[in-house]
Image (cartoon, rainbow, N blue to C red):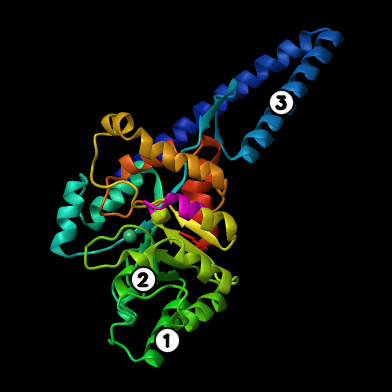
């Protein structure tokens, strides 16, 4: 081990010496060329080098401030500077996932072409450039309910809030304990499953707590996962009254109220404190070319109302993992949103609305 280290050190020193000698020879050669030049040629060379330096500095400033590209440069033995302009990979945050471990979730993930486990999800996130996700909690309010892998933040779910599992006082204390935590980035309501309208007085304290911790309240809107739920409670129009009554609360309309997209657009346009996620608009692992040819009516309908709203600074990409293939979902949302809004919709809005730091 010791002799191997010594050998490596000797190699490095040898390479360093050779590099230094080559550089000195280069400098010497150029010095001689410059020395033999006429005064005018020297001035000309000086001005050219100055112009090149100014161009390189200007390119740095331009590239590093546009945020769309990154700059890599190499010096090759003192002869050249090669500039490579690489388009920066789009940042993505998944603003709506679920983290289940039960049997059913394994099947859902399989149908979407995935495996429902952390190792697989992490490798998919690395492959697709996804920084992290916001879990919509389905584990009640117990303190341990907020423990998720470090690529996730969570909205504490009030999925069983009104089912007599907790007395009200205890429930608010437990909710506040979650809101105090940095990894808890909001509250999630499931009105269609709890049979309560979100503008109901019952939610008053929940909204007060969310506002005091400046954390948003995400609401399931639109179609439900099973027939025992009741749609009238999760129609997007129900959010209008809640948003109007509580202007200091930031609401997130999950799933864009799908399929009531027109009503969702009206509510989002009218209320600046309502944003939306685009999760749950796609399920499983569809044949994308077939989807784009057969479902153009559906896609154009959503595109039309998104552009009617023009609120691309309040829309967030989300998948509803494990229900959908992530790559398909990215492709689908790209079809809905004009390219100039990708940065906002795929990452920036979620970062701002949920206050995310990964
Ligand atoms: Zn969901």
Residue 191's mark? Answer: 2
State the SS at label 1. helix
**Does any atom of ligand 1 lie closer than 8 Å to the CB of label 2?**
no
Pointer 3 residue = 55
Question: Where is residue 140 shown, x and y percent of the image?
Answer: 30, 77
Which class describes the residues within 10 Å of circle 2: few (<14), some (14-19), or many (20+)?
many
Which class describes the residues within 10 Å of circle 1: few (<14), some (14-19), or many (20+)?
some
Question: Where is residue 37 shown, x and y percent of the image?
Answer: 79, 8
Query: Residue drawn 57% across and 63% down?
Result: 273
Where on the image, by quarter, is ligand 1? bottom left
Answer with the quarter of the image where residue 169 lies: bottom left
Labels 2 and 1: the sequence-earlier one: 1
Question: Where is residue 180 shown, x and y percent of the image?
Answer: 48, 79
Residue range (magenta): 258-265
Is residue 43 or residue 33 the one in the foreground?
Answer: 43
Query: Residue drawn 38% across and 57% down?
Result: 96
Pointer 1 residue = 172
The answer to whether residue 206 is above or below residue 236 is: below
Report the number of numbered marks.
3
Is residue 234 or residue 143 the one in the foreground?
Answer: 234
Is residue 311 or residue 82 the one in the foreground?
Answer: 311
| Nearer to us: label 1 or label 3 | 1
State the SS at label 2. helix
Is residue 193 or residue 23 the one in the foreground?
Answer: 193
Say whether residue 303 is magenta: no
| Nearer to us: label 3 or label 2 | 2
């Amino acid at each position: 081990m010791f002799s191997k280290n010594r050998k490596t050190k000797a190699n490095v020193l040898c390479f360093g010496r050779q590099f230094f000698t080559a550089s000195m020879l280069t400098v010497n050669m150029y010095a001689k060329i410059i020395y033999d030049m006429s005064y005018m040629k020297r001035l000309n060379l000086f001005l050219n080098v100055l112009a090149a330096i100014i161009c390189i500095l200007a390119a740095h400033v331009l590239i590093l401030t546009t945020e769309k590209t990154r700059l890599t440069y190499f010096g090759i033995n003192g002869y050249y500077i090669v500039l490579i302009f690489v388009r920066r990979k789009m940042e993505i945050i998944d603003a709506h996932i679920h983290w289940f471990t039960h049997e059913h979730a394994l099947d859902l993930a399989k149908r979407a072409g995935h495996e429902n486990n952390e190792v697989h999800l992490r490798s998919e996130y690395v492959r697709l450039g996804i920084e992290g996700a916001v879990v919509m909690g389905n584990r009640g309010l117990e303190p341990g309910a907020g423990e998720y892998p470090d690529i996730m933040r969570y909205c504490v779910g009030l999925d069983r809030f009104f089912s007599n599992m907790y007395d009200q006082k205890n429930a608010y204390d437990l909710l506040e304990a979650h809101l105090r935590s940095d990894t808890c980035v909001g509250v999630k309501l499931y009105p269609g499953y709890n049979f309560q309208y979100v503008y109901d007085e019952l939610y008053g304290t929940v909204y007060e707590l969310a506002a005091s911790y400046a954390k948003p309240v995400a609401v399931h809107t639109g179609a439900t996962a099973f027939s025992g739920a009741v749609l009238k409670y999760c129609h997007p129009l129900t959010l209008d009254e809640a948003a109007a009554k509580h202007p200091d609360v930031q609401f997130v309309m999950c799933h864009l109220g799908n399929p009531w997209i027109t009503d969702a657009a009206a509510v989002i346009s009218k209320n600046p404190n309502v944003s939306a996620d685009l999760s749950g608009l796609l399920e499983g692992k569809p044949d994308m070319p077939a989807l784009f040819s057969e479902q153009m009516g559906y896609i154009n309908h959503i595109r039309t109302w998104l552009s009617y709203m023009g609120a691309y600074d309040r829309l967030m990409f989300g998948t509803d993992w494990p229900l959908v293939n992530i790559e398909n979902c990215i492709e689908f949302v790209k079809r809905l949103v004009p390219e100039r809004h990708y940065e906002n919709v795929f990452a920036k809005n979620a970062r701002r609305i949920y206050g995310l730091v990964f």
